[in-house]
Image (tube, grey):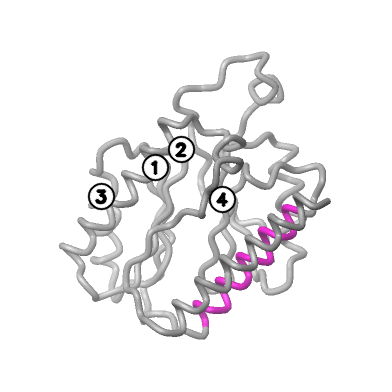
């Protein structure tokens, strides 16, 4: 119980820090990812090499987007197991396609899920709300004792919560139910890579490059 309480506190502190940043500055490009201590890394289902590759993908993609798009839009990107999720807003369809092309050419990227909206940049109020929703979702996943919360990457944009991770079908369905019931979540979109129970248990080899599932809305 003490360990769970400490992790919930860490989530609260992290959400507060991100919220503070959102209220004091406008950052047009955002790199995804969570603060990870030793215990977090130890339970990550990606290999350590893949985790480093994901960090490199985010940094390289961010730099290239900044060079080509500048501040025309508000683009967030999250890489998990070499699959990149793009969220945020861009002013036109051409920029949406340009960002996807830039990211798809980054070294080690396997696939890109382009969820960029063609519209004006979201407000600081909306971004702050999204940060709080993400924090609430992570806390709910942590409270679900039949789930390994660190197996999920959570991203929220304009009230839509995206779930990424290497999970079994049971975990995917259970997490979706938990997240859908979280206050502030308007819709859940699943971008999971599904493992068999044998792969998860280690009785079968983990696939080197799992085939990513397409973004799958799961309702509000």
Q: Which of the 4 image quadrants contains residue 167?
A: top right
> Toward which corner of the image does residue 186 lie, by quadrant?
bottom right
Q: Distance of mark 1 from mark 4, alpha carbons? A: 12 Å
Instruction: Provide residue 121's location: percent of width, then percent of height.
Output: 37, 80
Q: Mark 3 points at which residue?
A: 60
| Front tag of 2 and 1 | 1
**To which residue does mark 2 refer?**
81
Q: Callout 1: few (<14), some (14-19), or many (20+) C-alpha neighbours within 10 Å?
A: many
Return the residue at label 4: 153
The C terminus, quarter of image:
bottom right
The residues tagged by marks 2 and 4 sit, at their Cα atoms, a distance apart of 11 Å
Residue 199's place in the image compared with 111, above or below, is: above
The answer to whether marks 2 and 1 mark residues whose Cβ atoms lie closer than 8 Å is yes
For marks 3 and 2 on the same chain, the one whose residue lies earlier in the sequence: 3
Secondary element type, mark 3? helix
Left or right: where 129 falls relative to 80: right
Q: Which mark is residue 54?
A: 1
Dominant secondary structure (helix, strand or loop) of the stretch shown in magenta: helix
> Nearer the N terminus, badge 3 or badge 1?
1
Residue 47 to residue 188: above or below: above
Give the crowd class for mark 2: few <14, some 14-19, many >=20 residues within 10 Å: many
Give the mark nearer the N terminus: 2 vs 4: 2
Q: Is mark 4 on a helix, strand or loop?
A: strand
159 is higher (above) or lower (below) than 82: below
Which badge, 4 or 3, comes first in the chain's sequence? 3
Residue 43 screen position, x and y as percent? 62, 36
Q: Is residue 206 or residue 139 the one in the foreground? A: 139
C-alpha distance separating marks 4 and 3: 20 Å
Is 137 part of what is drawn in magenta? yes
Q: Please provide the residue range marked out in magenta.
A: 126-142
């Amino acid at each position: 119980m003490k360990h769970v309480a400490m992790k919930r506190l860490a989530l609260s502190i992290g959400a507060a820090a991100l919220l503070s940043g959102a209220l004091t500055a406008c950052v047009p490009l955002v790199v995804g990812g969570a603060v990870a201590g030793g215990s977090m890394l130890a339970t990550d289902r990606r290999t350590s090499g893949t985790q480093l590759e994901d960090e490199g993908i985010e940094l390289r993609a961010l730099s290239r987007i900044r060079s080509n798009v500048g501040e025309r839009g508000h683009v967030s990107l999250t890489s998990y197991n070499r699959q990149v999720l793009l969220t945020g807003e861009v002013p036109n369809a051409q920029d949406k396609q340009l960002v996807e092309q830039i990211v798809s050419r980054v070294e080690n990227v396997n696939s890109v899920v382009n969820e960029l909206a063609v519209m004006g940049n979201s407000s600081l109020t909306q971004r702050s709300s999204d940060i709080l929703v993400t924090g609430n979702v992570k806390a709910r996943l942590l409270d679900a004792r039949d789930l390994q919360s660190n197996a999920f990457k959570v991203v929220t944009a304009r009230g839509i919560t995206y779930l990424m991770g290497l999970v079994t079908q049971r975990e995917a369905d259970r997490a979706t139910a938990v997240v859908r019931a979280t206050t502030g979540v308007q819709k859940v979109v699943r971008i999971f890579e599904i493992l068999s129970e044998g792969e998860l248990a280690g009785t079968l080899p983990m696939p080197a490059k799992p085939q990513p599932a397409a973004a799958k809305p799961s309702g509000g």
